[in-house]
Image: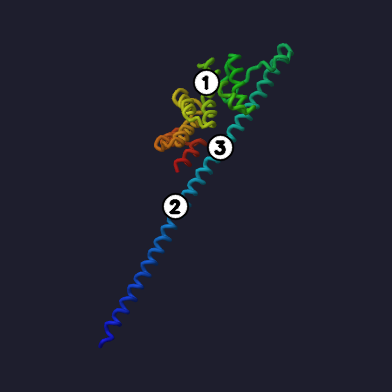
Amino acid sequence: MAQAPVSGLSSSGDVEQRLEQIERMLEARSDAQLKMLNQLGSLQQDVAELRGITEEHEYRLEQLLERQRELYQEIDRRFSNLKQNNSQSNEVTGNYDDLEQVPTQTDGSSYSPNLSENDAYDKAIALVLEDKRYDDAIPAFQSFLKNFPNSTYAANAHYWLGQLFFAKREYNEAKQQFETVVNDYPDSNKRGDCLLKLGAIASEQNKSADAKAYYEQVVKEYPDSTEANLAKQRLN
């Protein structure tokens, strides 16, 4: 009869030890689960960053391809103009000395009869598409817009200024140029890309709601365009 209490104490100690073991196991499991959640969150963030980088690369590739297409079109236009002038010179005087003086149509704009206007625009475009002298192109386009504010090339000049400032991450200046095209030149073939760029600028400036609104506007107004496909990717 005297041994009963001793047996009870021993049993109670075993239970406490087991409870402590269970608590340690639960704590270890909780720590492991927390660590796994942290790792999962980090992986998700990495995936999101990689997805953003991939989309940005796709966008820059599309811009590069578009620039190449414009350059090829520019070369074709210049060649066609030279051939046309060559033919006219043969019919009238047979003189080829003035070939280099012929103004050329560039960047999809309608042709202007103003020689100095065409020359100024051609030189600015050449700095971008041919010479790749982007820093020099900015004052060239600014000077062009100052001298020819009502030019048929004005919308494209604002567009290229926006592109140049955007590439330099000078987003406020780029935004001003793109907004000018969107608001003042509704028929410009650059307007869709300007809206897309405004969305990208808003995103860079952490204005998510504005970015979403611009992307949705691109999809709504230019549903079958390359810009709309890029906007959809950004929205997703």
Q: Is residue 50 above or below residue 64?
A: below
Residue type at the position of mark 3: Arg
CA distance for labels 2 and 3: 29 Å
Residue type at the position of mark 2: Gly
- Few, some or many C-alpha atoms within 10 Å of disc 3 (few <14, some 14-19, many ≥20)? few
Side of 216 where 225 appears, left or right = right
The answer to whether residue 233 is seen in the rendering is yes
Residue type at the position of mark 1: Ala
- Label 2 sits on residue: 41
Residue 98 numbered tag: none
Between disc 3 and disc 1, whose residue precedes? 3
Locate the C terminus and report the quarter of the image it occupies: top left
Side of 17 where 194 appears, left or right = right
Q: Of discs 2 and 1, which sits in the foreground?
A: 2
The image quadrant that residue 168 belongs to is top right
Residue 91 horizontal/vertical position (percent): 71, 14
Q: Label 1: state its secondary structure.
A: helix
- Label 1 sits on residue: 154
- Few, some or many C-alpha atoms within 10 Å of disc 1 (few <14, some 14-19, many ≥20)? many
- Label 3 sits on residue: 60
Q: In the displayed image of the protein, which residue is found farthest to the left?
A: 1
Residue 44 horizontal/vertical position (percent): 46, 51
Residue 50 horizontal/vertical position (percent): 52, 46
Residue situated in front as seen by the camera: 150 or 43: 43
